[in-house]
Image (tube, grey):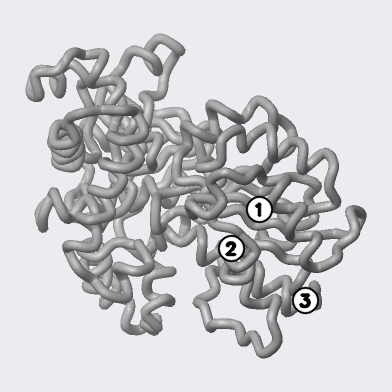
Amino acid sequence: MENSLFFYNPWWEEGYKSVSLWRRESFFEKFEGWMKENRILLLTGLRRVGKTSLMKLMIQVLLEKGIRPKNILYISMDDYTFKDNSIAEILTLYRKIHKLKTDEKIYLFFDEITYKKDYDIQLKNLFDKENAKIIATSSSSSMLRDRKAYLTGRTTTVEVQPFDFFEYLDFKKITVKQRDSALLDTYFRDYMRVGGMPENILYPERQYLMGLVDDIIQKDITAFHGLKNGDLLRDYFILLMERSGKQVSINKVANILKISPDTSSRYLSYFEDTYLIHLVSRWGNTNEKLLSPKKNYACDLGIKFLFHGERDLGSYFENYVYLLLRQTKKVFYVLDDAELDFFTQDKILIEAKYDTPLNDKQKKFFKEFPAKKKFLIDSILKTKELKF
């Protein structure tokens, strides 16, 4: 196990040189505040969305700030090497290696923490007893949610999302001057096809995203929940992508796939738990929110493109606007005299229209609907207004 610890922590040894990594400013502008909090920082999100890279960047920042290398520990918890060891046992060995006293401040990075049995109890004990700043990741929202009771009041949870369009441009070192802003539409179409997954932006390949989806379905859903029919789940996901941006009828999907409504509902929750889709409830009273079908959006435009193809650009734009809003707002869709895209918990109304205007009924409904603020977002440049 000692060799594995050195493998994961190359900064412990002489001659270590940090690797140049792209810095995600939208994340790091909040970094200082998170590190000062007396809380565990939990990073969640889709597999391969960049959670590990953010951890490595955080370590790099700490080293640049003068934190001693031996006071920083990183472990990938899905490594079989650590399967039979508790976090406390790993930490004891780590302290022995570096002769670290119990009261000496350390920084602990646990990647895919939910692979460790009873991780919640172990993190609680660690948080309560150690002088440590703990950062952990997970690709499953349900595993964090279901086991979070022990960690109540001890965590800050941050969802890491695929790169947004302007991060995509920055990552690819594309600069668009104001006088050339018309080019943004062309670049957005490229972004629509590729999406915001970092590795796929560098090396765009259909098989990469297809492999990611298959991995999540096989490993995080089929295997984890002990299901037998992975092909059925894949068919379900294809239906969701073909209907992304639309309301999902659990009963209709059940009829198409010849499964029970309960099974259909359960499968839908699995896709949401692994961040492959996001579900949006209808705005209204409690009954309307609970009983009305939810709209589903793809986690990434590139993944949507795999199954949806190059049609209905407006649905991609609406999906993109939702992903931006999701970063800071709880949102709902509005359905009454007409349907409007998004209404936030704090009474902001947003309609995303990229290639078609509002029809007369929508115009009237949009104008009359009571809201604190209203935004009609009809261009990629206008999405910058949504950085509330």
* Kind of residue sitting beneath label 3: Lys
Task: Pick whichever of labels 2 and 1 is earlier in the sequence.
Answer: 2
Q: Which residue is mark 1?
A: 135
The location of residue 198, given as percent across then percent down, is 38, 67
State the residue position of label 2. 55
Q: Residue at x 43, y 52 (%)?
A: 324
Q: Residues within 10 Å of mark 1 (few under 14, many from 20)?
A: many
Q: Position of residue 61 (x, y in %)?
A: 68, 73
Tell me if I can see residue 204 in this picture.
yes
Label 1 vs 3, first from the N-terminus: 3
Q: CA distance from mark 2 to mark 3?
A: 15 Å
Q: Nearer the viewer, residue 226 or 243?
A: 226
Q: Residue at label 3?
A: 65
Q: Amino acid at mark 2?
A: Met
The 10 Å Cα crowd at callout 3, few under 14, some 14 to 19, many 20 or more, is few
Drawn side of residue 117 relative to residue 243, left or right: right
Q: Whole-percent x and y of residue 249? A: 20, 21
Dividing the picture into quarters, in which one does residue 36 lie?
bottom right
Give the class, few, some or many, for how many residues have Cα within 10 Å of label 2's Cα (few <14, many ≥20): some
For label 2, the SS is helix
SS for tag 1?
strand
Name the residue at the bottom extreme: 15
Amino acid type, label 1 = Ile
Q: Point out residue 76 in the picture as x, y percentages from the top left corner.
A: 54, 56
Q: Residue furthest top?
A: 287
What residue do we see at 20% from left, 28% from top?
228
User: Real-space Cα distance between discs 1 and 3?
Assistant: 17 Å
Q: Are marks 2 and 1 in contact (CB under 8 Å)?
A: yes
Between disc 1 and disc 3, the foreground one is 1
Q: Quadrant of the N terminus?
A: bottom right
- Mark carried by residue 13: none
**Which residue is painted at 39% across and 58% down in the image?**
48
